[in-house]
Amino acid sequence: PPSAVSLNQVSPIAGSVAGGISVTLTGSGFQPGAAVYFGNSPAAQVFVESDGVIRAVSPASSGTGSVSVSVINPD
């Protein structure tokens, strides 16, 4: 079975609708090749630094408001 992913913290918690903000995700179970989504939009770039830290560049958004952040491993 796929390994469990836990996302504990997203920093910063706010950004620009223009995107391009470097966001640090901390948790566990991250794998090389993981994808990060802000709502339904994939991150512009994803850097898996370890099984507990990912840095992602936020995509541009069509509007303001909160979005969910998710990590999807390649398995």
Image: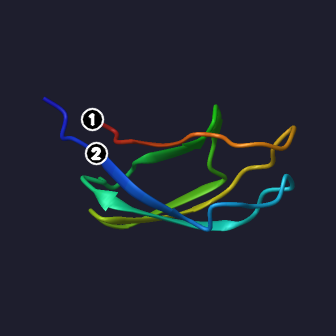
The type of residue carrying mark 2 is Val
In this rendering, would 50 be left or right of 71? left
Q: Nearer the viewer, mark 1 or mark 2?
A: 2
User: Which residue is the site of mark 1?
Assistant: 75
Quadrant hosting residue 20: bottom right
Residue located 34% across and 39% down the image: 74
Image coordinates for residue 71, horizontal then vertical, percent: 43, 44
Quadrant hosting residue 3: top left
User: Which residue is the site of mark 2?
Assistant: 5
In this rendering, would 35 be left or right of 18? left
* First reached walking from the N terminus: tag 1 or tag 2: 2
Residue located 29% across and 53% down the image: 31
Quadrant hosting residue 37: top right
User: Alpha-carbon neighbours of circle 2 within 10 Å: few (<14), some, or many (≥20)?
Assistant: some
Report the residue that reaches farthest toward the left: 1
**SS of the residue under disc 2:** loop
Point out the image quarter for the C terminus. Answer: top left
The type of residue carrying mark 1 is Asp
The number of callouts visible is 2
